[in-house]
Amino acid sequence: MALELYNSMSRAVEPLVPLDPAGKRVSLYVCGPTIYNYGHIGNFRTYVAVDLLRRALKHFGYQVDHVMQFTDVDDKTIRGSREKNLPLKEFTSIYRQAFLEDAKTLNIEMAERTPNATDYIPEMVALIGKLIEKKSAYVSDDGSVYFRIASFPKYGCLCHLDMANLISGARVNQDEYEKEGVGDFVLWKKWVAADGDVGWDSPWGKGRPGWHIECSALSMKHLGEQIDIHGGGTDLRFPHHENEIAQSEAATGLTFVKHWFHVEHLLVDGQKMSKSQGNMYTVRDVLAKGYTGRELRYALLSGAAYAKNLNFTWQGMDDAKTALTRIDEWRKRIKAAVTDGVSNADSFAAAVAFREQIDRAFSHDLNINDALGHLFQLIRETNKTLDAGQLTAAQASEVEAAWIALDSVLGLGDATVIIPAEVQALLDQRAAVRKAKDFAKSDELRKAIETLGWKVKDTAKGQELSPS
RNA sequence: GGCGGGGUAGCCAAGUGGUAAGGCACGGCUCUGCAAAAGCCGAAUGCGUGGGUUCGAUUCCCGCCCCCGCCUCCA
């Protein structure tokens, strides 16, 4: 089945046709975070969506070559490191590490390569040199280097901008007199006092790379002059991605990216997330409220299609949690049925159909909610069959395999429950008094366990514990 | 003003030119010492609004209203 993805360049859903002549390898470049702070859930909405793309590509048999850079030099990182009195590298490595931890919490598969921008200064300098040589860039009076937009007629193609209109628009920075054109953007920023000890030597003097150039340089360095998919948050479309196209294509003369993948923003309670609103949450904040990374991942994945705004609410987190519990209960039943199933040679039709249903759902621009819809239908089917005592071990295995296929894309895994020793002790004690039919004591122990944050339920197979 | 994304049950959210997936919440039932959980079953007279095309539109076209995003470094 062919994977079709919405391409924000063409504004249409298109079948993915890899550049690789063998049709096997797919190159994917994703603009990573600027590491000056902990990532918020809006950042991670993007990376969870990219993870969905990555996993879906693998599900459809592609070999994914994925690069995501970390932006470890810019105004914010420099300001942050100076405030904390730390060398830039030390400062950014804290947040790089934090990002990787949070990604792990959300079960995001890391890219094959995650370079830091500052480790590639020579590559960026070389690329800028090439652009100057080709007259696509110029050194301004103040010693910075700018990209000359007038040299790139295609400029604005990604966002379908009419440059004449844009330039006559209101928001033109009057101070930028050293630029030839208002749309020109910086490739190399001349060192200023506020940069402190941050700076690199270059043919144009001491300075630092502009933001956009790193993605062009790193993408070319690791994935080649042309790539299949380039992704990131929707806010990056303009100017960042537009600038990347200009830089890259001016340098190589080749189409930079075949397919643009943009993830829409996350809202919180219908509002744009912002510090002043007090609605900016980090992954850590969500965990502190008692939710798991898995629950957040589910909420981020199922809350809306990746190309639509996702409205984050705590109600939504609770919904996600409950839905996940339903899946988990079903998983327990299936696992048990794989060994305890009755005998009957027939294949389980719902599981067979399911494999095709999810392929179709994912192939259509990663329609995860369609896939989840089929999952819950499969859950109902199997539960019913299970209730009737008619699911065979072989059929349960089919269902198990169907789940594994789906979960390779969802990345939810099974719930893992680690029971603290003191809770286990109470549980054992309770099992004993229940055997003696001392229900008063049993209820008392249930309460004690509850105060420790766990719920106990009594099933035919004994007590079952879950975090409350 | 330019460009883009939306308006589907109480909430979230798929989808289709032929009469509405799914999740949460809700109601009933089953199970259960009780409880909770779980399981099963049920429920939309209609997809922002006014027109149009069509045998038939929520799905196509036109107008209108409302919400959101981007418009120079924010995922």
Image (spheres, coloured by chain):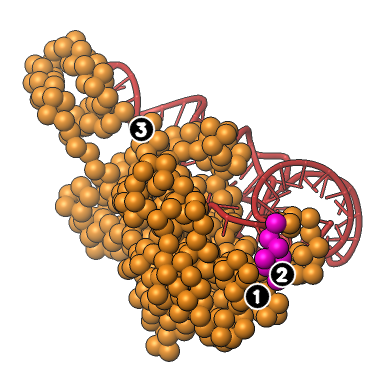
Instruction: Give the structural element (helix, strand or loop) at label 2.
Output: loop
- Which residue appears at 62% of the width and 63% of the height? A239
Magenta stretch contains residue A179:
yes
Q: Please tell me if label 2 and label 3 are on a single chain.
A: yes
Image: A54 above or below A455? below
Quarter of the image where the C terminus of chain A is located: top left
Mark with earlier residue (2, 3)? 2
Tag 3 secondary structure: helix
At 28% from the left and 57% from the top, the residue drawn is A400
Report in which chain the residue with disc 3 lies: A
Q: Which of labels 2 and 3 is toward the front? A: 2
Check whether the beta carbons of the residues at disc 2 and disc 3 lie within 8 A of each other: no
First to last magenta residue range: A175-183
Which chain is orange in the picture?
Answer: A
Q: Residues within 10 Å of mark 3 (few under 14, many from 20)?
A: few
Q: Amino acid type of disc 3?
A: Ala
N-terminal label among 3 and 1: 1
The residue located at (13%, 15%) in the rendering is: A437
**Residue A454 falls in which quadrant of the image?**
top left
* Label ID, residue A314: none
Determine whether A425 is above or below A312 in the image.
above
Q: Residue A344 location, x and y as percent? A: 23, 59
* Residue located beneath label 3 in the image: A288
Q: Colour of chain B?
A: red
User: What amino acid is at disc 1?
Assistant: Arg
Instruction: State the separation of the CA atoms marked 2 and 3.
Output: 49 Å
Residue A181's tag is: 2
Q: Which mark is residue A148?
A: 1
Give the main secondary structure, helix, strand or loop, of the magenta stretch. Answer: loop
